[in-house]
Every structure is written in C-alpha cells, then in structure tokens.
Amino acid sequence: MTRQQILAELKSGDAQFDVVVVGGGITGAGAAREAAGSGLRTLLVEQKDFAWGTSSRSSKMVHGGLRYLGSGHIGLTRDAVRERQRLMEEAPGLVDPLRFVMPHYRGQFPGPRLFQALLSVYDRLAGVRSRQHLPPSQTQQWAPGLSQAGLLGASLFTDAITDDARLVQRLIAEASRDGALCLNYVSANRITRDEAGNVNGVVLVPEGELLEAGISVSASMVINATGAWADKLQQQDPSEQPLSIRPLRGSHLVVPWQRLPVTCAVSLFHPEDKRPVFAFPWAGTTVLGTTDLDHPGSLDKEPVINEQEVRYLLKVAEHLFPGASLTARDVISTWAGVRPVVTDGQGKAPSRENREHALRRDKGLISVAGGKLTTFRQIAREALEAALGPDGSHRLRADDQPVFTPPADLPRPTQVRHLTWHRLKGYYGPALGELCRDADVTEIADSGVLWAELEWACQSEQVHHLDDLLLRRTRLGLVCPAGARALLPDIQERCQRRLGWTNDHWQWEVERYLALYQQAYALPSEGR
C-alpha cells in the first residue's frame, strides 16, 4: 500500500488494530516486525521520519558492550553478544563483523593482561573466540600510523557494524511484508481510553494537518517506543515508578578515509575523561566518536555538535595517529544523536548511567525506553509480551523465528562490485530483485551508493522530504562534501518525477535541506 492508501484507510473510520506502535526508531520497528510476524494487526506511526532520532545517529556498533561487562552488567552483555551473532548470521551485508584493535601503552589502563581476561569472558558469553594479543609489530600492520611511543602491543577482537537507519528500514519492510501498516510524519496526539481507563485507541495527526482533524483508530494495546520522547505519552499505574528520561548527546565526526585510512576500529580511552572512543571505517569514510554529555536542547529540533565536542573528537585522532595531522578542515560532516537513557536521578556522570532498558505499564499502554541498538529484538518482544498480558509469550511467534527474510539467489549485475552486491543483499533482502529490475545500477560519484537505490527509495520507502532521501535512505549527505550539494541537479533529474514534486516544491525542499545540513550536520559555526 502507498502512503496515500494507508492514510485513506485510516481516515475511513473503520481502522481497527490489535496493536499501535508509536515511534519509528529501532525499538518501534522491531516491535512492529515481531507483532506483524505473530499475526497481530499492526500499525506503526512516527512523528518525523523513520529512524529520524537516535536510530540514525548512533555509533553504528552492533556489540555486546565491553564497558558494560567491565561495569558488572553481565546479563546485558550476554544478551547483546548473542543477539550480535544472530544478526550477523541473518543479515550479512547489513550487520557485518568488524575487527577492533585496542592498543596498550606503557603506564596506561587497562594493561594487556587485564584486557585479555575481560575479552575471554566476552568471547565465552558469545560462544565464539575472536580475541588475540598482538605484539607491537603486528599492531602496526593492523593500524598503520598508530602512535608507537610506549606501545606494548594491542588486543584484537571482533564486534559488528551496521547502518542503523537501513536496519530500521529493513525491519519496517519486513513488518510491512507481514501486513503491518507503517507511516512516517504522523504524530500520536493522545491515547484514548474506555470508562474503566483501559486503552481503546489513538488519535493521529499527519504532518501539515490540523489537530482538530485528527484520525481516530481503535486498538487495545499501544507500545510507546518513542525513546527520548517516551515521557510525553507515558501514563503509569500509580503503583509503578514513572520513566525518567535523561537525554544524553553523542556526537561524531566524518572524515575522508584517505586522510585517516583505518580498516578496523581502533579504540582508546580518551585522555581527558577516560571514556572509550573510536576511529572506525564506515560507508567509505572514517568516523571519530563518540561524546557523552547532557543534551539540554529541545528534542523536537535536530541535535547538533558543539565546538568543544569537535576538539574532543579530533584529540582522538591526535593521540592515535599523530602523523595524520587531522584538523577541522578535514571534516566532511558531523552527526549528533540523543540517547534515551533511563535515569534514577542520582546525579551520576553521563557515562556512568545504566544503559539497560525499562518498561512501564498502564492498562494497555506500554512505555519502553533505554537499551541498546543490538538488543532491539529482545526489547520489542518484552514490550509486546507485557502488552499482551499473562499469555503474551504464547501469542508471539517463536523466539527462534528469523527476523529477516533472506534475499533470493540472484545473479550479480556485472557493473556492481562484489562488496556492493553483498551490501545490497543485506540492505534490501527479498526486495533486491525488484530494486535492480530495469534500474540504473551505476555508482554515484564513488560513494558506493547506486542510482537504483535513490530511485527505489523515492517510489517505495516513503520519502517525504529531501533529507529523508539524503540522510537516512542513503547517506550521501554525510559521505559527500557539502551534504552532496553538487549532486542535487542530477538527483532532481532522476528523483523529482518519482516523488511527484513540482519545480517550486523541489526548490523549497532543496533550500530546506541545505539549511538543515548547515545547521545540524556541518561543523559548528559562529552564532549557531
């Protein structure tokens, strides 16, 4: 169904669902996928774009979290590394293994023996062995240009990496294939209840429409998976403690791979605050991340990096690769995301807050926040089980059912590189054949992105604004200079007709996108 067809069905007044999921990030998309796969009539709505918030701005890591293991959160780490293994097996090309190098320097914590001991527990929880100790000479082979002053060697281990926005989009495609209706740019204005206080529906407002013209849909269960916005919809049973969300910002710098050529993730504990930070390869670039500090701004506006964070992240490159002489002039783009951390309000430092998720129940409304990208499936199932009641686990499909439908065994077009074909199979799964049929599979300006992907997104992935296309369906706006400004005429020629936009609408979208890019994805400027 097209977006217009879905909205028409909702406006007919006969829309009834078993469950409405509010929030189109990783948790909401996971909940819609599990609900629809279990035969529940499912609706997902997102007030902005799918993955607009935290789930397009994470550090892209699908990992167990060594820092959580070091803090004693063994259960959280065990669940995460097992989910990591599952995702790599089910969705190669979307979730792929990434080798990590942790260099050890004389007099710095942690030493090689302690870190290897931690990794042995990490591997045991995952049921695999990936750890290895590297002497200084081999460390240089894995990370050329790494600072050698006092280098004792390094620990090598494996986690995984993804494109978080594409992971969300793939989950939405799987949910839709099983019958879920999924809409972006539709807000849940309020929850409706019967005389006994039980949830019986939601009032929805599409972008650009008046609140008075809200659409009422019926449902006995609502999953509030809005992340940092969870406390806006949540209402709890008086016996339960309300969710208290502490928005924490994590920011990243994107630099050309040629300026900082890493083929694995290289980590260190930042010299200023001893937090783990990384330089890692992603989408043909190198990314430096991440910060962790309170975000005091409005959650409805794009979060932005500040100058202090830029200096903090450039120091990562300065300490790891002093010969690279990386400066702010090398930065292609930035991104900042807000983590929805559930806090106990005890005034801890941001990095010491617990990253585990939490649920709250209120007569059919289940609010969920916190947690990790890696464990989205478990969090989604737990929320659905809470909504379904005592027999919830029996009404959901079996826990071992696959999240992703494998792609058909298609021949690779000769113009498409092997690594690109591997990625496409992971990103699009069973839709890959349709995406490539009679499509232009040439690459856009050495970005690794195909014209066919833009065309497919315009006609099949609810592109509502230009930033949806350039920042989330693809990452051209992050990996190309100046937000891919030079490509806009070619993109217009191929995409405007597919989007059904007039020339005036296209120009308005371009101006809106470039202003947004400059404000939130470029380096901070004076007065921002």
Image (cartoon, rainbow, N blue to C red):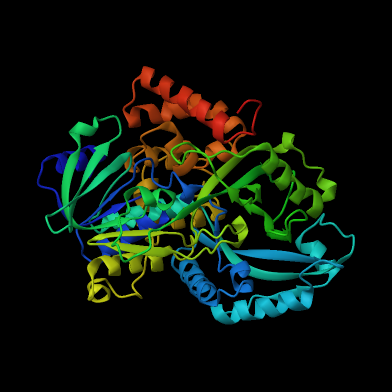
Q: Is residue 23 above or below residue 383?
A: above
Q: Would you say residue 290 is visible in this rendering?
A: yes
Residue 183 x %, y %: 29, 44
Report the quarter where the C terminus lies: top right
Residue at (59% x, 69% y) in the render: 68
Res. 109 image quadrant: bottom right
Q: Position of residue 132 (x, y in %)?
A: 72, 75
- For the N terminus, give its image quadrant: top left
Q: Nearer the viewer, residue 385 or 171?
A: 385
Picture coordinates of residue 444 (x, y %)?
Answer: 54, 37
The tally of labels here is 0
Across and down, in percent, residue 104 comes to 80, 67
Please give left or right for residue 325 compared with residue 17 in the image.
right
Vertical arrangement, residue 506 with respect to residue 233, above or below = above
From where the camera sits, is residue 413 visible?
no
Q: Quadrant of residue 27?
A: bottom left
Report the front residue among 373 and 311. Answer: 311
Establish if 197 lies above or below 387.
Answer: above
Left or right of 217, for residue 524: right
User: What is the residue that sits farthest to the top in this orientation?
Assistant: 504
User: Residue pushed farthest right?
Assistant: 149
Left or right of 51 in this view: 265: right
Q: Is residue 495 above or below residue 241?
A: above
* Residue at x 56%, y 30% (from the top left corner): 519
Q: Please tell me which residue is depicted at 23% across the width and 71% down the height of the picture.
A: 389
